[in-house]
Amino acid sequence: MLGITIRQRRALLFSLHEKTARLEVERDQEGRLGAAAERARIAREMHDIVAHNLSVMIALADGATYAMESSPQRASDATERVSATGRQALLEMRRLLGVLGEESSAEPLAPQPSLDRLDGLLAQVHAAGIPVTMDLDGDPHELPDGVQLTVFRVAQEALTNTLKHAARPTSAHLALRCERGGVELEVTDTGGQVLAIADSPPFTSASGRGLRGMRERAAAYGGRLDAGPAPEGGWRVRLRLRPDAGIVGR
């Protein structure tokens, strides 16, 4: 009986050691997956911030150069906007990178962009030389914060692509419809695309940025994103979300 008892205790201890080792492996795997997901999220946010603001700054700088002799005041205004846009981009980057620091920052972190900042985004693009109009159906403030962030980032990326790739002259139009069961965003421009976005390496790389990043954002809310030439000419980005689908893959 003593031998049987010792053997059973040894078997129990061995099984507990195996279970502990298995749990440690699973914990490490979950940590690595969580870190990879967080890196992907930060990479998307960094791309959206840098790509949009740099595109606006380049367009403003080009406009200031062209207007330097004929309209010094307009050139001066464009230069001031370049400076303001650069400061805003730097501030957003610092706040985003602040989450990576081990020590808490003395400055409070700003909330993620919501659709309240949509008017400011359109004003930025308009100042960079692309007239933008917008149609709004429904109340975007009733949408969850994550859905608002997704819609804002997709609109930002679509307008950034217009700044970078659309043949001039061009104008853009944004249509946003907010309903209880779904959200639809359509961004179109009239200038076409000098480079095909779907075939351009920056938008199809495995890094999860650009067009691929927009599709990942849409898929997180059970939606989809389509981008391509519009039937009437120009380029169109269409986003459809289902806010009640919850977060996928979390």
Image: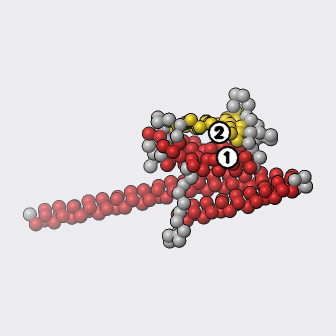
Task: Name the residue: 81% across, 58% down.
Answer: 76
Q: Nearer the viewer, residue 187 or 75?
A: 75
Name which of mark 2 and mark 1 comes first in the sequence: 1
Q: Residue 234: where, in percent of width, then height?
A: 73, 34
Q: Quadrant of residue 165?
A: top right
Q: Is residue 220 left or right of residue 17?
A: right
User: According to the image, label 1 marks what residue?
Assistant: 122
Q: Residues within 10 Å of mark 1 (few under 14, many from 20)?
A: many
Q: Residues within 10 Å of mark 2 (few under 14, many from 20)?
A: some
Residue 23: tell me if it is visible: yes
Q: Residue furthest front?
A: 73
Task: Name the residue: 53% across, 37% down.
Answer: 138
Q: Residue 74: where, in percent of width, then height?
A: 82, 54
User: According to the image, label 2 marks what residue?
Assistant: 134
Dot 2 falls on a residue whose secondary structure is strand
Q: Residue furthest top?
A: 231
Q: Are marks 2 and 1 in contact (CB under 8 Å)?
A: yes
What's the distance in space between the residues labelled 2 and 1, CA to CA? 9 Å
Dot 1 falls on a residue whose secondary structure is helix
Residue kind at label 2, given as amino acid type? Met
Q: Residue furthest left?
A: 1
Q: Residue 70: where, in percent of width, then height?
A: 90, 52
Q: Nearer the viewer, residue 14 or 21?
A: 21
* Figure disc tally: 2
Q: How is the image coloured?
A: secondary structure
Q: Is residue 242 left or right of residue 157?
A: left
- Image quadrant containing the N terminus: bottom left
Q: Residue 154: where, in percent of width, then height?
A: 60, 44
On residue 15, the disc is none
Q: Nearer the viewer, residue 183 or 23?
A: 183
